[in-house]
């Protein structure tokens, strides 16, 4: 007899930045595994397309289009979608923007805020909005998206690296604070994945060079990050909290 311990049957997952890239992959995999999905993104049409793909998999799915850095509207919409679904058990803080190669002197206040507001401010307020329901049900899974750069550092992208490290700080704080309610908080730190974000910010030449530094000799596939995130959302990790997993082809072997 086999037990499907990866099943997300009966769960509702909200994934930020799920119109494309890794977020879309998280949404589709979790829908395949039985979860109903709230597809959040700035891009309304593409969010609706992802939601439609989740519905085609037999799940209930709603598109929640907004700029997550507009906290008042973001939180109001979270409340509406939570009410519509009756609960939110899983939150994946995935939305992010590209961190172009910029020196410290080139990162002005506007650029710094654009990065920090989506990675750190929006993630915090999503958790603040959803924690009361999770506490009441004594169950929850929160997964923050960091980056390999939080472990390795990066060349001239310190606003991105700082924000990717900041969400790890949240994981440590929230994991301890929420453990008594059976709420697990973990982070995923993807190695480089070829998505629109990295292609636009690095370009193919840099991505190809980067690939050579990965012990496994290739970039991650979006699916490989989604498998890690869906595992962190599953009952298999009900005793795992405050941790970071990094599917990166061996890149941080010396850094662990
Ligand atoms: N691609 C990589 O190599 C890589 C590596 C490590 C970490 N990450 C992180 O993983 C996450 C996903 O990256 P991706 O490569 O799939 O990027 P992506 O650009 O393909 O997707 C990000 C999504 O977030 C949405 N978004 C951006 N700002 C938003 C806002 N203000 N409100 C609502 N939605 C917003 C975008 O519209 C987009 O659909 C990001 O947080 C990124 O920093 C990416």
Image (cartoon, helix red, strand yellow):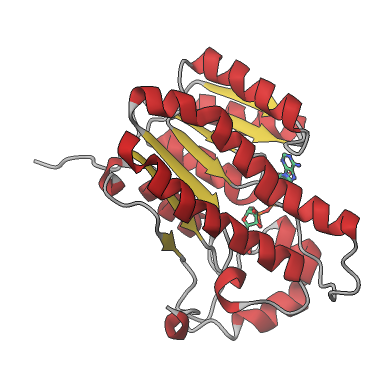
Camera-side residue: 234 or 144?
Answer: 144
Residue 170, x across and y down, in percent: 53, 52
- Residue at horizontal 82 percent and vertical 58 percent from the top: 112
Q: Position of residue 136 (x, y in %)?
A: 38, 22
Percent coordinates x, y for residue 52 in the rendering:
60, 26
At 68% from the left and 21% from the top, the residue drawn is 76
User: The N terminus appears in which quarter of the rendering?
Assistant: top left
Quadrant including the C terminus: bottom left
**In the rendered image of this protein, does residue 92 appear above or below residue 207?**
above
Residue closer to the observer: 237 or 22: 237
- Residue sitting at the far left: 1
Q: Is residue 182 visible?
A: no
Q: What residue is rendered at 68% in x and 83% in y?
A: 209
Residue 199 lies in quadrant: bottom right
Q: From where the camera sits, is residue 41 visible?
A: yes
Above or below, 80 relative to 216: above
Looking at the image, how many numbered discs can be counted on the residues?
A: 0
Judge left or right: residue 200 versus residue 144: right
């Amino acid at each position: 007899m086999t037990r499907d311990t990866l099943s997300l049957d009966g769960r509702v997952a909200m994934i930020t930045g799920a119109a494309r890239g890794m977020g879309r992959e998280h949404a589709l995999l979790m829908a395949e595994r039985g979860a109903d999905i709230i597809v959040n993104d700035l891009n309304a049409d593409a969010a609706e397309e992802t939601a439609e793909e989740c519905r085609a998999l037999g799940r209930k799915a709603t598109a929640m289009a907004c700029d997550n850095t507009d906290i008042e509207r973001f939180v109001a919409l979270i409340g509406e979608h939570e009410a519509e679904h009756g609960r939110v058990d899983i939150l994946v803080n995935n939305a992010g923007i590209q961190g172009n190669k910029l020196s410290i002197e080139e990162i002005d206040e506007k650029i710094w805020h654009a990065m920090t507001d989506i990675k750190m401010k929006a993630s915090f307020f999503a958790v603040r909005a959803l924690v009361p329901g999770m506490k009441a049900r004594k169950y929850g899974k929160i997964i923050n998206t960091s980056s390999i750069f939080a472990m390795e550092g990066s060349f001239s992208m310190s606003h991105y690296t700082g924000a990717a490290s900041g969400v790890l700080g949240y994981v440590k704080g929230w994991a301890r604070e929420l453990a008594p309610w059976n709420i697990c908080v973990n982070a995923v730190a993807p190695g480089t994945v070829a998505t629109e974000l990295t292609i636009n910010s690095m370009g193919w030449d840099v991505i190809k060079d980067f690939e050579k530094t990965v012990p496994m000799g290739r970039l991650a596939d979006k699916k490989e990050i989604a498998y890690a995130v869906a595992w962190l959302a599953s009952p298999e990790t009900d005793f795992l909290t405050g941790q970071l997993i990094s599917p990166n082809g061996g890149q941080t072997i010396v850094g662990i």
